[in-house]
Image (tube, grey):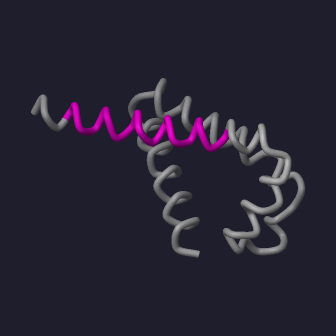
């Protein structure tokens, strides 16, 4: 079972690293807030300036949740990460 724990931990750390890098890149790039959400083809009511401004912070918060939580909170954060990344790839 040690092997499974190592794999799960490495997946969580990889997802967290990817989310942190993505969030920081969005914060550092001024044009990202418009182009990133246009690619995702979100509905108009979700594609607002507030969502574009909050997106990098949500990604960073989700990454920290993946790294620092356990139990049901970790399961919820993992599900949110997978669902959000799956949605953005499938659009």
Measured as percent of width and height from the top left, residue 41 is found at: 70, 74
For residue 60, side relative to residue 79 (left or right): right
For residue 88, side relative to residue 9 (left or right): right
Quadrant position of the N terminus in the picture = top left
- Going 52% across and 73% down the picture, which residue do you hit? 90
Measured as percent of width and height from the top left, residue 27 is found at: 77, 39
Q: Quadrant of residue 47?
A: bottom right
User: Among all residues in the image, which is located at the extreme top?
Assistant: 68
Question: Can you say whether 68 is above or below 22 in the image?
Answer: above
In the depicted view, which residue is nearer to us: 36 or 82? 36
Measured as percent of width and height from the top left, residue 80 is found at: 52, 51
Measured as percent of width and height from the top left, residue 61 is found at: 63, 34
Q: Which residues fall within the magenta stretch? A: 5-23
User: Among all residues in the image, which is located at the extreme right?
Assistant: 49
Total marks shown come to: 0
- Going 46% across and 51% down the picture, which residue do you hit? 79
Question: Can you say whether 31 is above or below 69 in the image?
Answer: below
In the depicted view, which residue is nearer to us: 59 or 28? 28
SS assignment for the magenta stretch, majority: helix
- Going 87% across and 52% down the picture, which residue do you hit? 50
- Going 56% across and 58% down the picture, which residue do you hit? 84
Question: Can you say whether 74 is above or below 38 in the image?
Answer: above
């Amino acid at each position: 079972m040690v092997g499974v724990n190592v794999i799960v931990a490495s997946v969580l750390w990889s997802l967290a690293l990817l989310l942190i890098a993505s969030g920081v890149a969005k914060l550092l790039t001024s044009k990202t807030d418009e182009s990133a959400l246009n690619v995702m083809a979100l509905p108009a009511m979700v594609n607002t300036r507030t969502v574009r401004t909050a997106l990098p912070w949500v990604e960073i918060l989700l990454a920290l949740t993946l790294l620092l939580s356990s139990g049901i909170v970790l399961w919820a954060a993992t599900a949110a990460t997978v669902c959000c990344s799956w949605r953005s790839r499938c659009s």
